[in-house]
Amino acid sequence: MYIGGGDYSGIFDETAKTTLTLTPEASGDYSFESMGFGFAGFDASSSDPAYGYFSPLGYSHQPQAAVLASNFVGLGMPEYLWLQLTNLLYKVDSTFD
Amino acid sequence: MCHLTKACSAYTGVWGKGWGFRVRFNSANDDLYMIIPLGALAVDNDLNGGCDIYIQYLDANRNPQSDQVIFGSLIMQQYKAWFDYDRVEATTMLKMQLSDTNTLTNSYIGNATITASGNPFVALADASAVMLIGTDAFHYKTTIRASLGFQGLTTFQVSMLGNYVYTYADSCMIATPGARQTSCEDEPVNAQTYFNSTIYYAKDAYSTSSYAGYTTSGEIYSAEFCINTQDTPYFCTIYNQEFYVADKVYDDAWNYGSKADAGSIGFGADSPVWAIVSNPDTKVFDINMNNFNDWTWADSSYELNTTA
């Protein structure tokens, strides 16, 4: 972790890789346009996702936002979203039980 | 948290198939989105030899941020992230790249077009399930437990040939002509005002209609639908299904003064119930009437005479 002013261009080089830039809301979280759970098949030559299916999590016109928290282990969700996701997890594979 | 009985390495078929989360933020540049592999959340549990998947639900009563999604360290460790603070404009931007050293296969940041495949989730096609039936020995009603939009299992009445599912909104009022409007929880409806509509989007409104003995009006919602069964966890649809949410009850001609529970679930051929088992051509259910073998309500001198 690096904190403070300085030249970190050697560590964080925006031109080296695709860089996702996000602007937080006033509340410090990051609003979703969409979030889904599913699968993607990747193109072997480009390593880009080529085909797939993602079932939306959440419901239309329902605002959602993410908080980035390094003091939290995994993925946290409100209960109704967690149940929605768990239902899909049970249907990923018959070995998931 | 989800627990799998075997070590994570036993589920290679799952991690390798590309299961994961596609996340698109409103403020993302260049239409970029992220794919986070499900495997990023899987951690071997050394105590029991199983595999833990760190997907946790948040208790809204404990923290006001519990209505948000939290990306924790298992997710963030895949990325190199930095905050760019502009002191002149007083703006902050978060910038993220895939890590150089710690990124799982199928992690992705980009804007490639994904061609839609068929729904990959294993629907419960041809599944048979034993539903747990409740018997109201006072009102002689049969009930089951179900949930709409994952708002928790609760008690619904059953309409064996009905084609609809309906429930009562938490704002539901009895609107009997000429009477003061009161909550649908009150006499004579005695409903459970089950459905919290604040987190869902109503597709449409429905005008005054009669169904399952009640005359109601309200709104039509679309969400997942689950039934409580004996052995099958998450006996639920994988597509949203339409159901009716009453916010006014005008009449309850059949059931005046008895419990309305949280609504009524139809098992007719066109009911969304059948979507749970992929809408088979032939829809079959058995009815066991053994619970209704007490005729003493009709005449106290009657003797039970139940034969198999």
Image: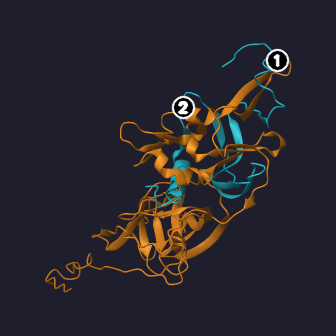
- Using residue A30 as the reference point, say whether residue B245 is left or right of it: left
In the image, the chain rendered in orange is B
Instruction: Tell me if I can see residue B190 in this picture.
Output: no
Q: Which mark is residue B87?
A: 1
Residue B184 vs residue A18, the one in the foreground = A18
Tell me what hue chain A is rendered in: cyan
Left or right of B103 on screen, residue B96: right
Q: Is any part of residue B236 visible from this angle?
A: yes
Q: Position of residue B187 (x, y in %)?
A: 41, 63
Q: Nearer the viewer, mark 2 or mark 1?
A: 2
Q: Quadrant of residue B219?
A: bottom right
* Front in this rendered view, residue B171 or B286: B286
Which residue does the image show at 70% across and 30% down from the upper left?
A: B80
**Residue B268 badge:** none
Decide: is B158 above or below B5: below
Label 2 – label 1 distance at C-alpha? 29 Å
